């Protein structure tokens, strides 16, 4: 913070303008933060019956005064660490005008909320825990006052007011008349870690991948007795080819991956996040914000709240939900995945014995079309395991009825079936990001998922028959037909 922007009012009657190196414990001193303490028996200022250890905004050595039409902002990263014993109320940050407070951050323990000139506004935390760090931002302009909490917009107050200024610190909302203990040992206290005005922005925190993974473990509910704990799965990963293959899960229970040890599950989570921030996964991009990431990682379609998840993790990491995930750079370059994360194998032990429809044919024997459809579901962001498709799609004995793909999936459908090599149709499908191509090869007895084309080697495909799936090349003469699936 800029010391010249503030005047300090203390509960011992002092006002301090020269803050450089200033300390007056216990009312104001520096540790890992600026500590503001105001006991209930402290002195008060005119027009107030409560004590304060608090900054008042200044401009060039004079009392600041501006209008809500002006573009102004104050950012505070802080924690309320103590409240009075009986009336447990503290104000920690406010906009004041020439007569009264306009809008404040108020704790009436345990409820932390926005107080709008004496009227309860939005609740920020219904059960605030003393000492928990949080950020608030006051922002004005055009007659509006916007309030952000931990980077998330919370409230707009529309009112043109003049004579305004910012205040930050501890304004204890009690005194000896309201307390049984009228001593210096009964107080409110606030710690401020960062304080910025206007265009000066707080430095960007740079959490590590491991810290991010730890936050995910916490919010996925990893504790003794939970599914995450039983499965050694701190990321609560669902069963997918990447998780079940390269990242080391060994079985699948209720569509949740099970790892042999916690160490394996932890390494899988760290590796997954490392791939995500370095563009190694198809569904994630390093340019994503934290909120964008959770829209994919914990989609609302699965009864999650991406914004609540992102907000909780951002709070733990000391960033905002708009922070780019590329911020969480790994300490070492990630390896290239051994296979792309959308390859499925029909001979995966988890489902190779599952029967297709009502037939006795198994996925391991005849499931290539189904596995390729699962590859497509991953591509279109609606990943579904072959074992599920074996029962949910429609079949003529063990042959897929193509139209049932569009009936089951919400994001894509069957578009076209062709019965010979069609270079034009294949090329159009391959080059259209809204389509995928499945090729019928080996004289019409096998299906593969088309990935690309080499001018010398031919069509590059994912072959689902081996476990794990393998990349293989097929010449034009080996293609007996195919199918096109596309976005709805």
Image (tube, rainbow, N blue to C red):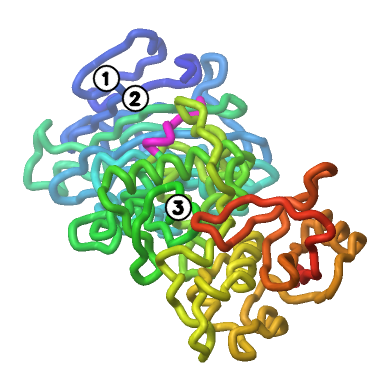
From the top left corner, tell me how far across and down residue 296 is, in percent: 55, 57
260 left or right of 140 in image: left
Q: Badge 1: few (under 14), some or many (20 or more) residues near its Cα, within 10 Å?
A: few
Residue under label 3: 245
Which quadrant holds residue 288?
A: top right
Question: Taking the image as drawn, is residue 101 in sight?
Answer: no
- Select label 2 or label 3 by which is in front: 3
Screen quadrant of the C terminus:
bottom right
Bounds of the magenta segment: 203-211
Closest to the camera, between mark 1 and mark 3, is: 3
Q: Position of residue 363 (x, y in %)?
A: 51, 74
Q: Is residue 37 left or right of residue 113?
A: left
Q: CA distance from mark 1 to mark 2?
A: 19 Å
For disc 3, the neighbor class at 10 Å (few under 14, some 14 to 19, many from 20) is many
State how far apart marks 1 and 3 are (Cα).
Answer: 49 Å
Q: Residue at x 55, y 56 (%)?
A: 469
Q: Residue at x 39, y 9 (%)?
A: 20
Task: Judge by depth and name the residue closer to the eye, 46 or 190.
Answer: 190
From the viewer's side, name the closer residue of 404 and 451.
Answer: 451
Lower sequence index among marks 1 and 2: 2
Which residue is label 2 attached to?
A: 9
Find residue 434 and report its horizontal and vertical position in percent: 77, 61
| Front one among 161 and 26 | 26
Q: Nearer the viewer, residue 178 or 115?
A: 115
Residue linked to disc 1: 31
Which type of secondary structure does the marked residue at label 3 adopt?
loop
Q: Does any portion of residue 198 appear in the rendered image? A: yes
What is the chief secondary structure element of the magenta stretch?
Answer: loop
455 shown above or below 51: below
């Amino acid at each position: 913070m800029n010391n010249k922007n503030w005047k300090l009012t203390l509960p011992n009657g002092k006002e301090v303008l020269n803050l450089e190196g200033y300390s007056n414990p216990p009312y104001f001193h520096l540790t890992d933060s600026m500590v503001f303490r105001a006991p209930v028996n402290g002195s008060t200022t005119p027009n107030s019956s409560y004590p304060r250890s608090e900054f008042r905004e200044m401009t060039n050595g004079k009392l600041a005064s501006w209008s809500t039409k002006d573009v102004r902002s104050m950012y505070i990263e802080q924690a309320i660490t103590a409240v009075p014993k009986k009336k447990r109320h503290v104000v920690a940050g406010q906009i004041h005008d020439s007569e009264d407070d306009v809008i404040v951050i108020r704790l009436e323990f345990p409820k932390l909320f926005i107080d709008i000139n004496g009227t309860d506004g939005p609740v920020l935390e219904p059960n605030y825990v003393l000492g928990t760090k949080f950020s608030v931002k006051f922002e004005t302009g055009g007659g509006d006052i916007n309030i952000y909490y931990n980077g998330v917009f919370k409230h707009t107050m529309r009112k043109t007011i003049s004579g305004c200024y910012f205040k930050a610190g501890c304004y204890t909302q009690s005194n000896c008349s309201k307390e049984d203990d009228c001593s210096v040992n009964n107080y409110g206290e606030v710690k401020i870690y960062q304080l910025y005005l206007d265009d000066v922005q707080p430095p960007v925190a740079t959490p590590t991948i491991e810290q991010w993974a730890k936050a995910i473990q916490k919010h996925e509910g990893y504790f003794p007795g939970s599914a995450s704990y039983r499965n050694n799965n701190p990321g609560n990963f669902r069963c997918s080819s990447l998780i079940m293959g390269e990242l080391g899960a060994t079985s699948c229970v209720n569509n949740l991956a099970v790892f042999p040890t916690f160490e394996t599950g932890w390494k899988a989570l760290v590796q997954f996040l490392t791939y995500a921030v370095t563009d190694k996964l198809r569904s994630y991009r390093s340019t994503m914000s934290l909120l964008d990431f959770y829209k994919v990682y914990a989609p609302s379609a699965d009864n999650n709240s991406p914004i609540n998840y992102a907000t909780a993790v951002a709070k733990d990491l000391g960033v905002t939900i708009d922070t780019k995930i590329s911020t969480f750079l790994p300490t070492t370059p990630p390896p290239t995945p051994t296979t792309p994360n959308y390859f499925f194998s029909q001979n995966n032990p988890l489902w190779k014995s599952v029967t297709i429809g009502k037939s006795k044919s198994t996925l391991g024997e005849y499931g290539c079309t189904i596995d390729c459809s699962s590859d497509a579901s991953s591509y279109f962001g609606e990943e579904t395991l072959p074992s599920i498709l074996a029962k949910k799609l429609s079949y003529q004995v063990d042959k897929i009825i193509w139209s049932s793909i569009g009936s089951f999936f919400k994001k894509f459908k069957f578009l076209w079936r062709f019965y010979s090599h069609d270079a034009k149709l294949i090329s159009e499908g391959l080059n259209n990001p809204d389509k995928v191509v499945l090729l019928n090869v080996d004289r019409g007895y096998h299906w593969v998922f088309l990935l690309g084309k080499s001018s010398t080697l031919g069509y590059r495909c994912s072959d689902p028959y081996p476990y794990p799936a393998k990349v293989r090349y097929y010449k034009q003469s080996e293609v007996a037909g195919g199918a096109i699936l596309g976005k709805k």
